[in-house]
Image: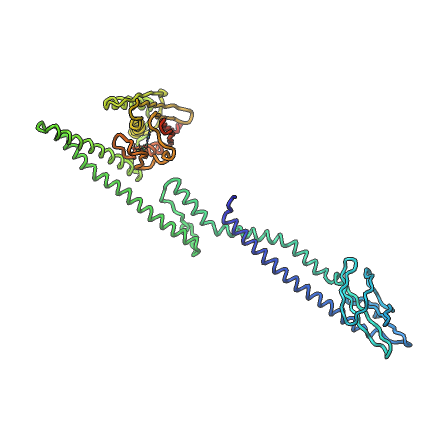
């Protein structure tokens, strides 16, 4: 089920409670005013009946009424009954056809043809042995009509009120949660560009306030500043260490070379010095890669782009790799599928580094005991140059494939035949990206790996 945003949830909650409170308030209001209205109608009816007693007199032993008795004042219809009880005079309202029993001193509520009526009877003694009943009838429905109009009006207004409330609530919540949206966007951008220099920056936008979200954003910005500082320090540390190590390692290599010139050394001593020299060279390689990456991180890695014939350059790199593998007696077969004359604006040294890394990996991760087969291809389309280095080596497991671009990551260190640092592909990725391109790896364990990179061609 789709999860609702906080904005929608708060608006619904707010609107729901607003409706609940409004409905409850209206219900209480209407019930109280209805009760008040009914009791007013009853007292009006009783008063009118009591006052009408003055209009009933005894003339020649017979009860008579004067003309006032017939007027319908205050919506009350009056009539007089003798003690049998037989209707003598008066007016009965239209639509009131029933003749309820006389109930002296009581108010009866009677339903007639969809209308409600109040009927009030009062006995009135005219002489010693002459008693009459005065009956007052008034319509409850008519009395309630104005009240019903207001009720209907409220019912029509209520949905509109709910809509307005929801709209205002939504706008308000949206405004309140705007900083949260900004925080989410900032975090997303930081993740996408790994750029820790970004800030939410609510203070800068002049929206200084003391609310919790503002404080959270401010704390978040402080934390980002601290993190950036730590990362900066770490980059500087790597750069400094690599720099400091470069000179002693160069001295070790140079000294090894000089020592090996000494004719008095035994065979064992020569072997030991050669081992030291080999390891020192590997160390120099790693230091070089570290320096390269830390310069890249700090934006200090020099890039000199020029128009290159990368078809020719790639061919030369493959030839050199062929020579190197032959020299080391490594059984590898190279296949080239290079479109001639492809021009690309790129840094030559970086491009060589990129290709050398991919090809040397293809050589290193061949299947043990089998002849390695490596295919290098280069093609152009309208918009891009696409290169590929493909091998039939040991391959990479699917779960490890996304990790190979990370620094110092080695899929299976035990299977490596030389001193691999796990920095090569990080450099390759950086080189491709700094040229505005992209790179991906496809691999099947036990079958081989294919690296495909592409650069946009700028017209
Ligand atoms: P390394 O110096 O270890 O080769 P990389 O960054 O070049 O470092 O490669 C990272 C990891 O990716 C390697 O350790 C290896 O496990 C895997 N890998 C790279 N290229 C290939 C390949 N062509 N075939 C199989 N695995 C490879």
Say left or right for 363 vs 204.
left
Q: Percent position (x, y) of residue 202? A: 42, 50
Specify the farthest residue to the right.
60
Specify the farthest residue to the bottom.
128
Q: Percent position (x, y) of residue 400? A: 36, 35
Say left or right for 188 vs 87.
left
Q: Percent position (x, y) of residue 401? A: 37, 33
Number of numbered discs overlaid on the protein picture: 0
* Image quadrant assignment for residue 435: top left
The image shows residue 419, relative to residue 69, as above or below, that is: above
Q: Percent position (x, y) of residue 254? A: 16, 32
In which quadrant will I find the C terminus?
A: top left
* Image quadrant assignment for residue 457: top left
Q: Nearer the viewer, residue 243 or 420?
A: 420
Which residue shows up at 87% across the image and 78% down it? 129
Say left or right for 223 vs 73.
left
Q: Nearer the viewer, residue 96 or 184?
A: 96
Specify the farthest residue to the front.
369
The image shows residue 281, relative to residue 171, as above or below, that is: above
- In this picture the colour scheme is rainbow
Q: Quadrant of ligand 1?
A: top left
Which residue shows up at 33% across the image and 37% down it? 406
Say left or right for 97 vs 208.
right
Q: Nearer the viewer, residue 233 or 256?
A: 256
* Image quadrant assignment for residue 422: top left
Which residue shows up at 50% across the image and 47% down it? 5
């Amino acid at each position: 089920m789709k999860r609702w945003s906080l904005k929608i949830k708060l608006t619904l909650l707010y609107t729901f409670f607003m409706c609940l409170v409004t409905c409850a308030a209206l219900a209480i209001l209407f019930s109280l005013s209805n009760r008040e209205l009914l009791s007013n109608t009853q007292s009006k009816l009783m008063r009118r009946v009591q006052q009408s007693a003055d209009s009933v007199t005894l003339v020649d032993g017979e009860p008579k009424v004067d003309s006032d008795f017939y007027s319908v004042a205050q919506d009350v219809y009056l009539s007089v009954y003798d003690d049998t009880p037989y209707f003598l005079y008066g007016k009965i309202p239209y639509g009131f056809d029933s003749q309820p029993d006389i109930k002296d001193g009581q108010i009866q509520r009677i339903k007639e043809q969809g209308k409600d009526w109040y009927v009030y009877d009062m006995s009135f003694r005219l002489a010693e042995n002459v008693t009459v009943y005065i009956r007052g009838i008034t319509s409850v429905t008519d009395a309630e009509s104005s009240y019903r109009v207001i009720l209907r009006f409220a019912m029509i207004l209520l949905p509109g009120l709910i809509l307005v409330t929801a709209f205002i609530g939504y706008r308000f919540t949206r405004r309140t949660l705007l900083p949260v949206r900004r925080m989410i966007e900032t975090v997303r951008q930081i993740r996408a560009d790994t750029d820790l220099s970004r800030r939410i920056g609510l203070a800068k936008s002049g929206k200084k306030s003391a609310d919790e979200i503002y404080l959270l954003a401010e704390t978040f910005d402080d934390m980002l500043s601290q993190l950036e500082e730590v990362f900066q320090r770490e980059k500087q540390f790597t750069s400094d260490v690599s720099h400091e190590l470069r000179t002693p390692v160069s001295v070790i290599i140079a000294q090894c070379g000089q020592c090996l010139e000494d004719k008095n050394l035994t065979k064992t001593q020569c072997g030991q010095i050669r081992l030291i020299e080999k390891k020192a060279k590997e160390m120099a390689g790693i230091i070089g890669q570290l320096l390269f990456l830390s310069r890249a991180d700090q934006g200090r890695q020099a890039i000199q782009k020029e128009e290159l014939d990368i078809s020719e350059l790639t061919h030369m790199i493959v030839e050199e790799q062929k020579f190197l593998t032959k020299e080391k007696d490594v059984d590898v077969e190279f296949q080239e599928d290079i479109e001639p004359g492809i021009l690309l604006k790129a840094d030559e040294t970086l491009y060589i580094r990129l290709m050398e890394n991919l090809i040397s990996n293809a050589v290193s991760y061949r299947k043990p005991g089998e002849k390695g087969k490596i295919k290098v291809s280069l093609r152009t389309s309208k918009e891009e140059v696409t290169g590929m280095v493909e091998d039939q080596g040991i391959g990479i497991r699917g779960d490890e494939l996304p990790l190979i671009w990370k620094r110092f990551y080695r899929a299976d260190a035990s299977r490596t035949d030389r001193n691999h640092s796990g920095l090569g592909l990080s450099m390759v990725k950086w080189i491709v990206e700094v040229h505005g391109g992209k790179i991906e790896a496809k691999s099947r364990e036990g079958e081989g790996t294919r690296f495909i990179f592409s650069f946009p061609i700028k017209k």
